[in-house]
Image (cartoon, rainbow, N blue to C red):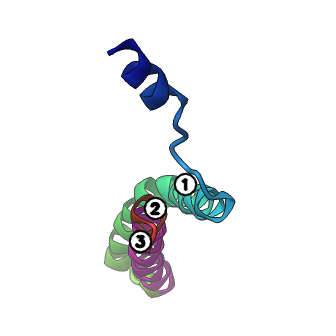
Amino acid sequence: MKQEQETISNRKVFENIDTKKIFHKGLKYLALALPLLFASPVIVTIGFKALNKGNGYLVLILGCLLIIFTIALVTQAFRLILKSLFNK
């Protein structure tokens, strides 16, 4: 029983260096996407409020593009993390 616990605790999560690098890359993408998850809806809201004043199309388009970019970035991050965890 004790030997089984020692062998389980001695095993590494990432036995391959490449999978560890892919996992870190996925975490970096998530870290980059986190501020965008909050900033993108705020920019869209500012764009809609400026649209009522007459000239908010540029800010609204920028906010929508940022939302699309954020969704793509989060999707890519989760894809990389799952790839590293399941070694595919």
Relative side of 30 to 21, left or right: left
Tell me whether the residue at label 1 lies in contact with that at label 2, contact meaning CB atoms closer than 8 angstroms. Answer: yes
**Does the magenta segment cover residue 60?**
yes
Identify which residue is drawn at 38% across, 70% down.
44
Residue 14 is situated, as x and y percent measured from the top left of the image, at: 55, 50
Majority SS type along the magenta span: helix
- State the CA–CA distance, disc 2 to disc 3: 6 Å
Mark 3 element type: helix
**Does the magenta segment cover residue 47?**
no
Identify which residue is drawn at 48% across, 53% down.
34
Label 2 sits on residue: 81
- State the CA–CA distance, disc 3 to disc 1: 11 Å
Mark 1 element type: helix
Label 3 sits on residue: 79
Q: Inspect this view and state whether residue 51 appears.
A: yes
Q: What amino acid type should be assigned to the residue bearing mark 1?
A: Leu
Neighbours of disc 2 within 10 Å: few (<14), some (14-19), many (20+): many
Residue situated in front as seen by the camera: 5 or 55? 5
In which quadrant will I find the C terminus?
bottom left
In which quadrant will I find the N terminus?
top left
Label 1 sits on residue: 27
- State the CA–CA distance, disc 1 to disc 2: 7 Å
